[in-house]
Image (tube, grey):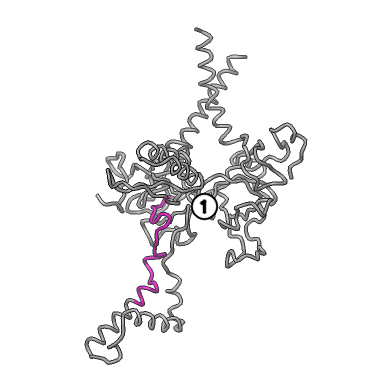
Amino acid sequence: MSSIFVKTIKFFSGFCFVKLVEENFISLNPSSGESMLPTIQPQNDWLLIWKFKLSSNSRHKNEQIQEITNNENLSPQAKKVMKNLTTLGYQIHNEGEGKSKKTFLRSYSVLDNLEVGDVVVARKPTNSDIRVCKRILAKEGDIILMDPTKKSKLSTIAYHVNVLENEALSADNEDFVGKNDKELIHEKIDELNLNENFLDSYENKFVKVPKGHVWLGGDNTEFSVDSRNYGFLPIGLIEGKVIYHINFNKSFYKFEKITNCYKDI
Amino acid sequence: MNNFKALLKTIAISTPIYLYTSSNIVTIGRIQGESMAPALHNNDYIIINKPCFFNMFFKDLNKQDIIFFKNPDDNSLCCKRIVNKEYDVIDTNDELHDVNVVPKHHLFVLGDNRNNSIDSRKYGYVSEGLVVGSVNKTIGFVWPPSRWFDKLE
């Protein structure tokens, strides 16, 4: 009787251990959908996901505070102020090396192990049961064009101003003689604001990513439902980063590393 | 020596079970701050139902539930009360949002102590995927003992 009891408990603890590893450290999941097509195939492609639930934000802060208190020759008052500010959500940010090293405070909250260009697995904000695999296109504080496949207000204005300037140069038109580029642009904006045909292209605009959010997009822009549809994604919904993938469609398969194509080498 | 080995064995077997239950079924949480003032005070210990286990029996979150969620602003844990669910219309005198209908699968949360809480009035709607757990109202408080017979609503 007791041996059966012990065996079931052992089995249950093993099950729990596997589940904990799957939830918090590493997991292998199949892909579905063609939104990431050049990098990840729609079927028979398995993703190795590194999850960083355990690495919380406060842990990062503490490490950074320790670095500063050890390396910098700050006065004790400055250290106190730094510590108080870091508890309020500011992070210490170093620039330069050696003697030119300077310390700044930034109010960013995205973890340092997330970068622009990383492929990431997240939960959909409009339906938390569905998980999506997308690439990070902008972190907080960045400015990004909502839909690069469509026209925007700025691009149309630039096009019109360019045409007008060319006309003025070719015909020696007297209207454009004393005018700056700024005045031209403002005139064009006023013209476009009156024209209702351009209203659709106005929706496509440059947006700034707010604090604690990221902007996601699929590699296959025409067949992906991403931040263009559901807006900014809070970093709490991100589950992990995709590091490797195996494609079982190939005759000779192995783990291939996913490269960050937005980074200088 | 045999006793020491047996102790190590029990620890090795019990830690995965403890971590799994605390992350997926039920945990004890501590309140920090006075933003839920009449219902919950600073340093109260309460029991939290985790959503994976909770959803098997009760399906959905209801209005007036107290939830723990990750703050969309800076990813820290918060404890607030659900005031509006998806597709509800909100009356806000503040110039918060242009359209005040709660979007699909989102929640509008507020602290009970309205004068002293940072909530959806500041950071907007909270996605349901950010919810970490909900407070168990039937069992109530774990600690301090002076609050054992207080009712949570």
Which picture quadrant has residue B87?
Answer: bottom right
Q: Residue furthest left?
A: A170
**In the structure shown, which secondary structural element does the residue marked by tag 1 occupy?**
loop
**Residue A154 lies in the magenta-colored region:** yes
Q: In the depicted view, which residue is nearer to us: A62 or B140?
A: A62
- Disc 1 designates what residue? B73
Q: In the depicted view, which residue is nearer to us: A222 or A242?
A: A242
Q: Which residue is found at the position 42% from the left and 82% from the top? A: A190
Q: Is residue B53 left or right of residue A165?
A: right
Q: Which residue is found at the position 72% from the left and 36% from the top? A: B139
The span shown in magenta is A133-157
What chain does badge 1 belong to?
Answer: B
Q: Is residue B41 left or right of residue A260?
A: right
For badge 1, the amino acid type reads: Asp
Quarter of the image with the N terminus of chain A is top right
Q: In the depicted view, which residue is nearer to us: A61 or B46?
A: A61
